[in-house]
């Protein structure tokens, strides 16, 4: 199991949570500051092209569409990202 240090994470209560959290359904989501980097394979200026950004946050890698940075990001374990990159760089026949 992966362990991520959330000591500096910002927490936000889900808009789907109910009541004060003591008796209702409450879910909070952690956000860790990360620097987003545009893929060198992305095209265009971010408004009309295919634009993928990645952020490295410890044991995880986040991927998002730079045209819609406020939408959800795909977050995967760093080892799975390494496997993905290896497959892209050296695809099996």
Image (tube, rainbow, N blue to C red):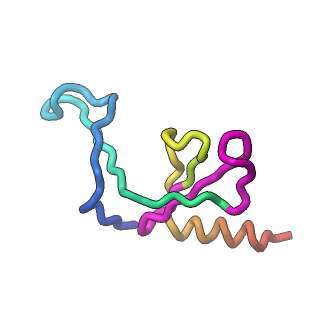
Q: Position of residue 43 (x, y in %)?
A: 74, 52
- Asked whether, in this view, residue 84 is left or right of residue 12, the answer is right
Q: Which quadrant of the rendered structure holds the C terminus?
A: bottom right
Quadrant containing the N terminus is: bottom left
Most foreground residue, 32 or 84: 32
Asked if 15 appears above or below 39 in the picture, the reply is above
Q: Is residue 72 above or below residue 33?
A: above
User: As displayed, is residue 25 above or below residue 38?
Assistant: above
Q: Which of 12/75 is in front?
A: 12
Q: Is residue 37 above or below residue 52?
A: below
| Picture quadrant where residue 20 is located | top left
Segment colored magenta? 40-62
Snapshot quadrant of residue 42: bottom right
Q: From the viewer's perspective, is 25 left or right of 3? A: left
Label the magenta part by its dominant secondary structure.
Answer: loop
49 falls in the magenta region: yes
**Left or right of 23, for residue 27:** right
Residue at left offset 33%, top offset 30%: 15
User: Residue farthest to the top?
Assistant: 19
What is the residue that sits farthest to the left in this orientation?
22
Q: Position of residue 46 (x, y in %)?
A: 66, 46
Total numbered labels placed on residues in the image: 0
Q: Is residue 76 visible?
A: no
Q: Is residue 55 visible?
A: yes
* Residue displayed at 25% across by 32% down: 25
Q: Residue furthest right?
A: 93
Residue 9 is a magenta residue: no
Q: Position of residue 73 (x, y in %)?
A: 51, 47
- Which residue is at 50% across, 54% downward? 75
Q: Residue at x 56, y 60 (%)?
A: 37
């Amino acid at each position: 199991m992966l362990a991520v240090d959330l000591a500096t994470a910002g927490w936000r209560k889900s808009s789907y949570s109910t009541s004060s959290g003591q008796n209702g359904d409450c879910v909070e989501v952690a956000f860790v500051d990360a620097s987003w980097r545009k893929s060198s394979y992305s095209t265009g200026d971010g408004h009309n092209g295919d634009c993928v950004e990645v952020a490295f946050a410890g044991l995880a890698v986040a991927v998002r569409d730079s045209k819609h940075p406020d939408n959800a990001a795909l977050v995967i374990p760093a080892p799975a990202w390494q496997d993905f990159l290896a497959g892209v760089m050296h695809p099996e026949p």
